[in-house]
Image (cartoon, helix red, strand yellow):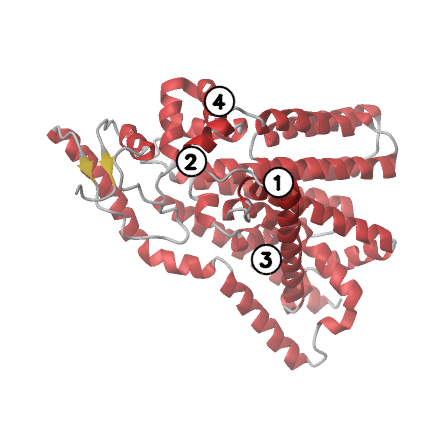
Amino acid sequence: MTAQAKLQTQWVGIGVVLACLVLLVLLLALGLYAHPTSDDFDYAYVAREQGILGGVIHFYQNWSGRYASAAITLVFGRWVDLAQSYWMVTAASLVTLYAAFLYSVRALCRLLEIGRPLMLGHLAVLFYVLFIPRLDTALYWLAGAATYQAGNALFLLFVGVWADYFGGQATQTRDLRFGLILAALAAMIAGMNETIMLVTVGLSAVMVVVVLRLRGPRIGVCLPPLIVILVLGAIAAFAPGHEVRLGIIGEVGNESPGRSLMISVFHALVTALKLLLFALVFLQIGFVRSILAEALARFEGILGGLSAADRIQLALAFIGLLVLLFFPAAWAKGAEAPGRVQSVSVLLGTLVLIPTMAALQYTLGDRLSPSRASLGRLASAVSLIALLAISNVPKLARDIPRLQTFHAEKLARYALIREAQGLGLTALGLPPLRTRMKVLYSKDLKPYERREENRLFGAYFGWHHPIWAESPP
């Protein structure tokens, strides 16, 4: 690479970092207009009445076994004024994800001897945030962010710790130390949500095989995390609260394991195909190829040193993780996982995007890009525009002009409750929420006064009378 090309690549890398930071600042600013809704008030009410530990026990017995995510949500509900400081939810989610991505990518780059980890870390954050299926429930809803994004951040730390382990010499003391660190992370991941728990179980099993193959029997590093996540994952999965929740919300009964597996495999293959298409499109963008040149060359070298059987096993292992990702929703509902759950698939896709690009480049070579420079520039521009069109950019553009209106409607509702309290009213019908957002979570109350969600919404503000989301009949 010439000096001019290196300088150009450096400036493109700086541009990627700045673009990532600008997007994060924009998302943080949008969080100032987010408001609590749905399960948020339920957790806040329980946290105030029963405390954090009592709340975790309550939800374990009456809702689900997600003890870690429940604890996070309860902490916010107890110590944060959700009506005034809800922006802290988005801030906490983005900051933890940002830090976890940078740590994980740095550890992987050090292991694989790839330079410029800071730029690659920001590129990973940028890709992930742009292509999360549901930003609203992922970052702007406390119950969703605490359940899924906190779990994703922990998973990134889990991956980074494994990378750090392989980056040093193996000794019994070091094995035990890393095994205990991984076990502590596994204990928290097991109580986040069923999806990330199963994916971590799958990754742990893969890591056991890798450790045994590369370093021989290393019980100290393999067994602690695997045992912890299997035991605590089972405790979470078989919580009595699951049966209670099914009775309350009336979900369809569980699918058969065979059909659930078929549904999961189908969605895993579709997701893997999407990843291949994304990797193919990214290879058409000139500046992406330039900033990833070193990483792509490194992975091509790694792939070239593997046998065909090894490459097939790696691909099957990744698809297996995707199957575990989709299995809980397929088993519970016979359907594809909701958007906030699919954020995990985007997370996995982000981690393996560069290796996938390298695999395509290794297999197809020069056939991936046009031979003529003019056609290459056209393909680069079209690919970039196409990616931005299907990203979260259009949703952000749609929401920004509506922010003030949405915010004003929410504040008007709080004012109506305070006014009703002052007048001593015994019932209150709130006007329906007219402004709906794509990025901010804008789920409305139900038009039925006896809904538990409505009751807890009012109770949070000290209102203990019937409330609904439209004028009374």
Instruction: Quickly name the residue at label 1.
Output: 256
> Where's residue 67, x and y in %?
53, 26
N-terminal of the two: label 1 or label 3? 3
Classify residue 154 as left or right of residue 93: right
| 92 and 398: which is toward the camera | 398
Q: What residue type is labelled 4?
A: Gln
N-terminal of the two: label 3 or label 4? 3
Rounded to the nearest angstrom, the CA distance separating label 4 from label 2 is 16 Å
Identified at 42% across, 30% down, the residue is 76
Q: Tag 3's secondary structure?
A: helix
**Up-down: is 388 above or below 180?**
below
N-terminal of the two: label 2 or label 3? 3
Question: Which numbered disc covers residue 249?
Answer: 2
Rounded to the nearest angstrom, the CA distance separating label 4 from label 1 is 25 Å
| 52 and 261: which is toward the camera | 261
Instruction: Quickly name the residue at label 4.
Output: 61
- The answer to the question of whether label 1 and label 2 lie on touching residues, with beta carbons closer than 8 A, is no
Rounded to the nearest angstrom, the CA distance separating label 1 from label 2 is 20 Å
Q: Tag 2's secondary structure?
A: helix
N-terminal of the two: label 1 or label 2? 2
Question: Which numbered disc covers residue 149?
Answer: none
Rounded to the nearest angstrom, the CA distance separating label 2 from label 3 is 49 Å
Q: Which is more foreground, mark 2 or mark 3?
A: 2
